[in-house]
Amino acid sequence: MRKYTKIKTTSCIFFFSVIFLLYGSISEATSGCCSHHSGVCGCDTSVGRQLCCDGTDSPSCGCQYIPPISTYTPPTTVKTSLPVVPDCNTQLNSLLDRATNAENQLKIANTTISDKDSQLKAANSSIKEKDSTIGEQSTFVAWSGIGCIILLITTIYYYKKCKELKK
């Protein structure tokens, strides 16, 4: 029975020690805080000071400060002036003039392209004519060259035959 009493006593001491330690760390108040104001009763997070039990803030002990949440206030000035819009007819006339100028430039470009196209066709036909002439000439030269080679071979053949007959 004595053993059971010893365990019970040890458990009670341990339990109260833990409670004392936890209570001491939770309060976070130090000695001297609110000593002349009935002790510490909490924390005033709006100013970051310990709250004394008589309702005053501790002049010497602080605690966690949580700043107040600010609310958005929209601007009070309203813009009353409207932007200046030019006359619609002036804008339309300007756009019409620009379109007319672009159309004229396009006509000039098309005429220039047409002229260049005609020049290109004339140059192509001239090249075709020269090609056919060159083709005829090259054919003649080729056959002439072949004829010369045949003539040379024939001459060499008969020259050798003649030499053989003389021997």
Image (cartoon, helix red, strand yellow):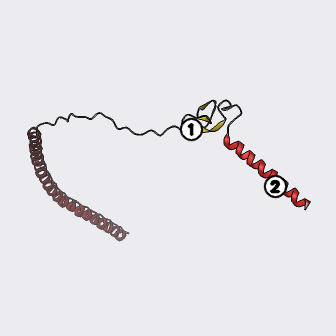
Above or below 129: residue 40:
above
Give percent across and percent down for residue 11.
Answer: 81, 55
Q: Tag 2: Cα neighbours inside 10 Å, few (<14), some, or many (≥20)?
A: few
Above or below 24: residue 4:
below
Give the residue type that dot 1 points to: Thr
Q: Is residue 41 left or right of residue 87?
A: right
Give percent across and percent down for residue 2.
Answer: 91, 59
Q: Is residue 152 left or right of residue 16?
A: left
Which of the 4 image quarters holds residue 84?
top left
Badge 1 or badge 2: first in the primary sequence: 2
The residue lying at 88 percent from left, 56 percent from top is 6
Q: Which residue is mark 1?
A: 45
Q: Nearer the viewer, residue 66 or 75?
A: 66
Which of the 4 image quarters holds residue 46?
top right
- What's the mark number on residue 11? 2
The N terminus sits in image quarter:
bottom right
Q: Is residue 153 left or right of residue 120?
A: right
The C terminus sits in image quarter:
bottom left
Q: Is residue 9 left or right of residue 76?
A: right
As drawn, the residue found furthest toward the right would be 2
Give percent across and percent down for residue 55.
Answer: 58, 34
Above or below 17: residue 59:
above
* SS for callout 2: helix
Q: Nearer the viewer, residue 141 or 93?
A: 93
* SS for callout 1: loop
The residue lying at 59 percent from left, 32 percent from top is 57
